[in-house]
Amino acid sequence: MNKIIYLDAAASALKPDSVIEAETDFLRNKYANAGRGICARAAAVDDMVSAARNAVAAFMGAVANQIVFTAGATDGLNRAARLIGVENMRVAVSDLDHHSARMPMVAAGADIVLIGLDENYNYDLSSIPAADVIVVTAMSNVFGTPQDVAGVIAAAREKNPNVIAVVDAAQYAAHMPIDATAWGADFICFSGHKIGADTGIGIMYVREPMRWRPDNFGGGMVNKITDAEWIFNDAPECFEAGTLPLTQIAGLRPALAAWRPRAGHDIISGLYDALSRNPRIKIYTAPDAAVLTFSVDGMHALDLGAMAGARGLCMRVGNMCATWAMRLIDAPAGGVARLSAGAWNRPEDVVVATDIINGIVK
């Protein structure tokens, strides 16, 4: 088989050598548990965790005690719903949402209300409803367009100054710098694996961490237990019960150091120009979007994906875990195809991927 052309960054980014080397070095030479030992090696791991937390805080304009390590964006969004306690609360969502952003709210018993979108599938700020909680998708994994997160939250607070804002930044974090202070969100969640770190590590930013009672319980998060009360550790440790994903945390700082804004956008722009000339291809995304989402007239998305994969092209096909966006664009029954690029892609990948797709879609 020829070289694999990996154009599925939006599902998971390939890992820089620095991430792989940092994790390998940790496992081979530096491994110990965190927060549970006093030997030099354990202390060094504590320092590593602290340094990674500080790096994440700097990455998103926060402070260290606002950064909670989770298992991923999905875990963080579920935890945000639990921490808030959304049962019987009015929660505003939109058709941009990934399943992971809306489903935790529904499952926790929220009263769902819908935010309107404009003709370009961006938030319509004039249609923000009054709500107790608002879920904001900073960038849809179908459309790949950054949203005005600060504007959406500000509009929601005009209706209810006390609205709690939860931001799904899983796709946004891969392409654009986050400014937690400017956004004014109460919770911001994203995954390490979207930005070049490992799977199994996520970030949950909590604007006012001591406002919330912990939702997970166990080792490391409680300072003292008496018959009368539990005395929790300070944030963020009070939200991090159990052993942290230390190997993944070891790779987090180098991933952030290697992160570059708009990585792969030139590749997607080139693919847009090339594939828009094929009359059987319908493109749903803008020319400057972070991803290219399309369908092929008369072809099931799974068939396209299988044939492209057999020719060495990796891309995502299906409903993208975004049922509501699929309905919005009236997608075919089999869903759509999505191309997404990263820093590892080169201009020649545009030529090869275009030839593969056009060779299938004649």
Image: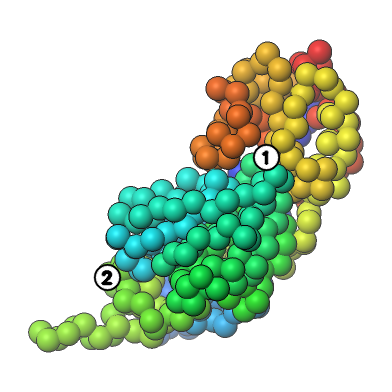
| Left or right of 156 in this view: 341 | right
Q: Residue 218 carries which label?
A: 2
**Quadrant, the N terminus:** top right
Of residue 288 and residue 351, the one placed in the foreground of this image is 288
Task: Check the image and report above or below for 296 versus 285.
Answer: above
The residue at which mark 1 appears reads as 8
The reply, left or right, for residue 228 in relation to residue 336 is left
Mark 1 or mark 2: which comes first in sequence? 1
Q: Three-letter amino acid code at disc 1?
A: Asp
Quarter of the figure with residue 133: bottom left
Q: Which of marks 1 and 2 is in front?
A: 1
Residue 277 appearing in the image: yes
Q: Disc 2 residue type?
A: Gly
Whether residue 21 can be seen here: no
Quadrant housing the C terminus: top right
Residue 138 percent coordinates (x, y): 62, 58
Q: In the image, what residue occupies the spot 78% across and 54% down?
A: 263
Q: Which residue is depicted at the point 70% across and 56% down?
A: 146
Rendered image: mark on residue 215: none
Where disc 1 sits, the SS reads: loop
Dot 2 crowding, Cα within 10 Å, few <14, some 14–19, many 20+: few
Residue drawn at (27%, 69%), measured in percent from left and top? Answer: 217
